Amino acid sequence: VSRPDPEWTPAAVLEALLSGELTRDRALAALRGCYTEDLGFARIDHDRAHRRGFPEVVFGPGKTPAQVREIFLRLAARNPNVLCTRTAPDAARAVLAELPEAELDAETGLLWTWRDREVRGVGEVLVLSAGTSDGVVAREALLCARIMGNQAELVADVGVAGLHRLLGELERIRAARVLIVVAGLDAALPSVVAGLVDRPVIAVPTSVGYGTAAGGIAALLSALNACASGVTTVNIDNGFGAARAATLMNRP
Amino acid sequence: VSRPDPEWTPAAVLEALLSGELTRDRALAALRGCYTEDLGFARIDHDRAHRRGFPEVVFGPGKTPAQVREIFLRLAARNPNVLCTRTAPDAARAVLAELPEAELDAETGLLWTWRDREVRGVGEVLVLSAGTSDGVVAREALLCARIMGNQAELVADVGVAGLHRLLGELERIRAARVLIVVAGLDAALPSVVAGLVDRPVIAVPTSVGYGTAAGGIAALLSALNACASGVTTVNIDNGFGAARAATLMNRP
Amino acid sequence: VSRPDPEWTPAAVLEALLSGELTRDRALAALRGCYTEDLGFARIDHDRAHRRGFPEVVFGPGKTPAQVREIFLRLAARNPNVLCTRTAPDAARAVLAELPEAELDAETGLLWTWRDREVRGVGEVLVLSAGTSDGVVAREALLCARIMGNQAELVADVGVAGLHRLLGELERIRAARVLIVVAGLDAALPSVVAGLVDRPVIAVPTSVGYGTAAGGIAALLSALNACASGVTTVNIDNGFGAARAATLMNRP
Amino acid sequence: VSRPDPEWTPAAVLEALLSGELTRDRALAALRGCYTEDLGFARIDHDRAHRRGFPEVVFGPGKTPAQVREIFLRLAARNPNVLCTRTAPDAARAVLAELPEAELDAETGLLWTWRDREVRGVGEVLVLSAGTSDGVVAREALLCARIMGNQAELVADVGVAGLHRLLGELERIRAARVLIVVAGLDAALPSVVAGLVDRPVIAVPTSVGYGTAAGGIAALLSALNACASGVTTVNIDNGFGAARAATLMNRP
Amino acid sequence: VSRPDPEWTPAAVLEALLSGELTRDRALAALRGCYTEDLGFARIDHDRAHRRGFPEVVFGPGKTPAQVREIFLRLAARNPNVLCTRTAPDAARAVLAELPEAELDAETGLLWTWRDREVRGVGEVLVLSAGTSDGVVAREALLCARIMGNQAELVADVGVAGLHRLLGELERIRAARVLIVVAGLDAALPSVVAGLVDRPVIAVPTSVGYGTAAGGIAALLSALNACASGVTTVNIDNGFGAARAATLMNRP
Amino acid sequence: VSRPDPEWTPAAVLEALLSGELTRDRALAALRGCYTEDLGFARIDHDRAHRRGFPEVVFGPGKTPAQVREIFLRLAARNPNVLCTRTAPDAARAVLAELPEAELDAETGLLWTWRDREVRGVGEVLVLSAGTSDGVVAREALLCARIMGNQAELVADVGVAGLHRLLGELERIRAARVLIVVAGLDAALPSVVAGLVDRPVIAVPTSVGYGTAAGGIAALLSALNACASGVTTVNIDNGFGAARAATLMNRP
Amino acid sequence: VSRPDPEWTPAAVLEALLSGELTRDRALAALRGCYTEDLGFARIDHDRAHRRGFPEVVFGPGKTPAQVREIFLRLAARNPNVLCTRTAPDAARAVLAELPEAELDAETGLLWTWRDREVRGVGEVLVLSAGTSDGVVAREALLCARIMGNQAELVADVGVAGLHRLLGELERIRAARVLIVVAGLDAALPSVVAGLVDRPVIAVPTSVGYGTAAGGIAALLSALNACASGVTTVNIDNGFGAARAATLMNRP
Amino acid sequence: VSRPDPEWTPAAVLEALLSGELTRDRALAALRGCYTEDLGFARIDHDRAHRRGFPEVVFGPGKTPAQVREIFLRLAARNPNVLCTRTAPDAARAVLAELPEAELDAETGLLWTWRDREVRGVGEVLVLSAGTSDGVVAREALLCARIMGNQAELVADVGVAGLHRLLGELERIRAARVLIVVAGLDAALPSVVAGLVDRPVIAVPTSVGYGTAAGGIAALLSALNACASGVTTVNIDNGFGAARAATLMNRP
């Protein structure tokens, strides 16, 4: 079989089996490869896009540049949009050398291909940040939400220390379908926002601050105990996770 | 004006003003009462149903029976469905003495009126519990989800210690629109479920267990660090909060 | 010397020495008693009212009824206003049996004499509570502030889940000289209030809630990391401590 | 309209509207700019000086040099005194290149303009430090208090391990109107100082030390549980926050 | 051999072997019993008084009344002074029924026999308590120190909120050979005391207080980070442990 | 089919299908029941004994007496040995009323049937306890190990405060195949034991003690950081879990 | 005696004594050296291989290169297989310069000699990793298990986010005798694996992740509270410890 | 007065006053300087050697090289032995440039002058370390104990994983008057040592290890909960503090 591996989809395999292009044994092997690809150090889940609506997202830390490159390329061979979070610079270089169409956002370490730009979400995903210092995490959420097929926008620096900044954007906030609220320190913003809308609010606590704020535990506990109900939360600084959840909430 | 307070909606007030039934001063006072009702110890937010899709939910603990009764009755005077969580038995009795149509679930302490039974959610909210001991929290989520206008069902005791129990319900799980996964101990279930579906998964960590499990911190941390992305979490044992968030995600 | 102990003030002692009413030795002993009274299990600091503006406040827990009674009576013998916090019922009964003029607030366990009702503070101490369930702690702050010589008022249940409740009281809030903000759960209220005023805000985190809220750590961390600057905080549930600090801030 | 933005105050706008210098639309836009200035990554709260007595203070960490420069310059265009805390060296250079009148304190990272040097506080803000190693935080508190319009002084290294050092300064301590007590390790100093005065004491726990002291949690807990009442606390190492609160307490 | 077990000391066994009173086998068994006595649920260490200067001290919690009684009686059969800490009332009754000479202190739960009242320590062990509420723990330390052969005294309620109370006892404090300082809340007292003496200071943090004080962690961290060097600490509320350590420090 | 459900094993079902006793549909239903039994509130995993060597063990807390009874009876219908841990007294009574052969250990709350008493383990499981107060947890481990088919013994009260007690049992300790070491406080025993043997050591930290010991975190951390390698640990007070793991290690 | 120290085994010493090659004094000294070797900074336990089945394993951190070299060489003089974990590069160079046969794995910092390659374990030790980022810890476990005499293999990247990856290896997993499961984040894998096998499962929580995952506490708590019984755990990132325990479980 | 400041002792001042060498004013100033020396950033406590038996010890971290140099020189002008802990290299260089007789131990960062080498302690202070990696902390304790006037020795690497190493030194251990036991990981050594002696044992938990050991909390909790009574503890890694306390315990 001379066709490159990634071209074998389950349907193509069955067709080739029936047409005699593939023997039973080769068909079985090809089928197995449609679902899982074992690189020794990694076992790529090629079924994930089908099962979950978006392919496996690579988590950069703890992987060598060679590992990141290999996993990214294999995923890019079969999926239009591929994402790697918190990519180390040398790992990004390793991928870009092989796949010049990939893009890197240096501030967040996001690395991606974005070939399929169709918007599939039913409404807007709106990312709010409490302060300028929360900007990197908010940016990660924004970029991920877009690459995953949402119309997404950012409203920056509307923390509650100056309520009029937030209230001045009330119309946009009420028009969104899913809200991602990125906040550090005491993370009072998710509560205040949730009290104003009838759409899901995802809190992203950040590790901004010092003393008891550093690490983001204060912000996380605020999010978990938001006095306005309907807030759910993700891990500290996890902009990607919020975007992933928002995408699922925004599906038709 | 002989009409009882709760009958004044903002629209009714304006109409009565134009018709001369109300003077300007009385109209202003009536308008104010449409939005907030000050009981001294409590300031009821009568605008909340309009703003957020469901009226203020009473949090039982820390309130005297008289306070719970008063707040509950005032809310029930203006809203078809009213909810009080973790109601103490004597507080529940105080409400039921005045409002026999209210219902109490003794196991969870939920107290409610449920006059408007229309289902407004677009899909099913499915509550999964990892073990029988997580049952009370799962039940709180289930009942709240229903009273808030969702079609909701429960699949109990499908923890990962016996994977076939979970996999045997795969079809139902994949058909749900929002999943609430209630789990204590190591809370491995949210990750496993999220890995199988393309819908939002809300984790509810429970305080089931002893030693390092008691208090639910172990389960909470698992939910925050779920290796399958797209999971968001609420506070420990907060079945109500999960149902509230699910309702928002399930809106048309 | 037949005069009862409490009548000896330092000035009276010196006068009696000069007039020959007291010998040197008796004067020295009387002087010592002006500053400290040793009951064996307690060493009352009778100089405190002079040094700090209010006499020693008795902390009820961990003391036997007999100890509370003895300390309270000794203080009441020399000071117009005496305060005991978190008094156990049997300790309160022991005091009231001897000193019927004392008053007990059963909800908070505050026990006091309030003979000197002059208002000495320069402005109003305003206590705000986020929810009805924070009421006991707010009440402790309110009562203590009054007994310590302040004009003090309470605005209850203005948590941020319904911002219009808070904004509806903006005028009163801006008129206060010191603000005590009592809040549990995510304690978003201190930040929001501090962002609106140019007066000191003292946060009192409460242990209201369950899961990660119980114990009040979430609320405490919010107070410490309030995104609006100028907030200082006291210990969880410490309404008395906030009133004490507010009194010092409110002095001429 | 050729006048630079910062010259538009709300009063000037209304006047220009009446005089015909501005149309209604331009007046509305100019008014909006009086209160909030949106830089995309930041939303400056120009109303804060009016509302809270001092303009927004820039928090350095997590912002790029370009962001710090931009925000600082916009604030300096409208306010005499501007402050940035924990400024990174390259961010400070970026500001100083544009605004040579600004000053940097290298030890604390404070960056400021201090055009209005009028003292507005009614008494002295006295900063006490327990040890020489607490010096940087004490210095931040001292400088901020001065720039915010207080007469402020420092008494260094008076920790309780040698009580005579503290008692030797008793007169100065009792003369102050607000006391900021900066202490790491076991932070015994706030309690001892508060026991001696009838003015508010703000504790600033520091992260000085190692083992269980590092991070400042031990000192923070001491401050929260000070056995002398009337102590309030701010976050660990937060000299700025203490100065901000002291300024509010020191207002006429 | 008709002599009761406890009469066999190692020396008596050897003598009886040489005199022919015991065979080799019985001598071996008797010797074994000199060092360890196996009750099935407990293995009493009869060598401890010889090795460590005081016999095994029974820890009351978690043992049934029958277990406490049995262990206590076996120890009392061979040692003049025996101690059980935190004895439950029914366990104390079980012992007292068999051994009427034993004494119980109801406040602390200490149960003891004190036949040998010789003072062996070289100086005074002085117990200081910060507040009356620390009294139970201070009392445990005082009683244990006496029963273990020390001259021991208590100076109660000398916390730093009123320094003159402490300074008024300076002479006694400086005369002691070992100081046990019992303090809850911020536990500032150990530092202040250690700064005044040249003898070892043992801190006993107590769980007095509420909010972040409850549990005694705040006090423990203060003790570990005492800014005056030379302080060592024991576990929270562990008055017995402090007395045990003080006894070892007070040996000739 | 009149045969009671529990008699259907997978093999019996297939045989009955082939013999015509069962139709295909009834065979499918019977097969499903061999693996999982859905009681609504619980989903019993009847395959577990086959898969894991011992049937599902019921965790008592959080279940109603009726739930415990139902689950226990269903398990006992198919398995010779059934176990419920931490059974509440009323739940135990509910089971015993239906199944008089069951046995309850009141101290630990273990409830069991033990019909199959064959010893299957290849060597001895030896349970060591550091102190008499660790006895309840040690007993849970001992009983569970026996009911799961091991020869198991207990050596009580051999904590390191008197090393000769431990060293006196060295021979028995070295002869065991798996060691379960139950210890609270500083849990020094697992390290010392592991340093002496070449067999696996399972540490069970207990919540014995007060102050920083209470809850068992101190003991757990000791177990995790045992300086002798080869120690693994289970949750605090989890005697059952240790016995379960020991059983797996002791299989042929 | 000219024979180098390491040649003296206890048996050789006794023989030399009897043959007259050694005097009594030299024999005593040689015997002492068989068991312990005192290097001043270290006291090597040469009896450990005999007592525990494998010689002392050197813990690299906190030791100077000279110390590591000396200890390693002394151990290698008497034992075929020697291991040092987390070796710093300069310490490794110091050893390799003297002992070129030693091998270093740069990724893990393992340094070893592996002269005796006989497999002594009775079955396979199978190491599973949840993700590629857990690879370093899994590799440490794998290499250690092999050097300690086990047949050991690795199955990488089978986390539960894609269950089919795990289920595809079920046969290998069920065939193993001991399973080491390496997982970070929510560490759901140990529970799922333990639910499928009847062999001991050792969990190794890793510090992979960020926010609340960093440090590995989330993963550790999951392992301790695994809902499938029979899991024991080792310290975070402790691949070596898991291999050591697995070796003991895998002995005949 | 031409005599350099440090020559003025209180006695010399009084003598000079009486002899007319000093006026009253100069005598008062000189007296003040005998007790406290104010450097602006530091307030040296020159009375400490008299009061506490050893002069103030400088804590290096958080001080600039110039500050360390100045404080060290002032202390060295009046005291024979001066100590600075955790001195940064540049601070040490600054002191050594001025005071070549000072000595630096690079491993621990201790810097000292040691002119008075008389041994004043009544017995031996014995420092035990559990492992070679605890060496730096043990060395700090050893050096400090010697410079403070004790005969002190070190017994290294006697952790409980190989009990014979410890038991082989039993005679030396029992002969010591004070024992300092330095241990990381599970810190089992203090318990075992305390169980063998009748002298005070000071535990120094160290931050050796990784995972849950890092930071030394596990070791600290073990020390606080030592099952052998009579152990007191100091902060993590605080070798100096242990030596200071041992010196006080070792005084005649």
Image: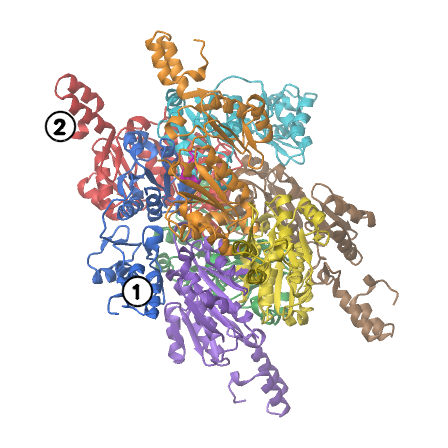
Chain colours: A yellow, B purple, C green, D brown, E red, F blue, G orange, H cyan
Circles 2 and 1, Cβ within 8 Å, touching? The answer is no
User: Which residue corresponds to mark 1?
Assistant: F18
Describe the element under mark 1 as helix, strand or loop.
Answer: helix
Q: Start and end of the magenta stretch? A: F221-231
Q: Position of residue B202 (x, y in %)?
A: 51, 63
Residue A223: give its label.
none
Please name whichever residue, C130 or F69, is drawn nearer the observer in this view of the structure.
F69
Q: Residue at x 74, y 52 (%)?
A: D68
Q: Residue at x 40, y 55 (%)?
A: B161
Is residue F229 one of those drawn in magenta? yes
- Foreground disc of the pair 2, 1: 1
User: Which residue corresponds to mark 2?
Assistant: E3
Q: Chain of mark 2?
A: E
Residue B205 in the image: above or below residue C29? below
Residue E92 in the image: above or below residue B109? above
Q: Position of residue A199 (x, y in %)?
A: 59, 70
Q: Position of residue C212 (x, y in %)?
A: 48, 57
Amino acid at dot 2: Arg
Question: Circle 1: is it few (<14), some (14-19), or many (20+) Cα within 10 Å?
Answer: few
Residue C182 in the image: above or below residue E106? below
Please name whichever residue, B87 or C199, is drawn nearer the observer in this view of the structure.
B87
In this rendering, the count of numbered labels is 2
Amino acid at dot 1: Leu
Answer whether residue H123 is visible to the viewer in this image.
no
Answer whether residue D156 is visible to the viewer in this image.
yes
Describe the element under mark 2 as helix, strand or loop.
Answer: loop
Question: Which quarter of the rendered picture does the N terminus of chain G lie within?
Answer: top left
Picture quadrant where residue E87 is located? top left
Q: Chain of mark 1?
A: F
Q: Position of residue D91 (x, y in %)?
A: 75, 47
Question: Which quarter of the rendered picture does the C terminus of chain G lie within?
Answer: top left
Is residue F40 one of those drawn in magenta? no
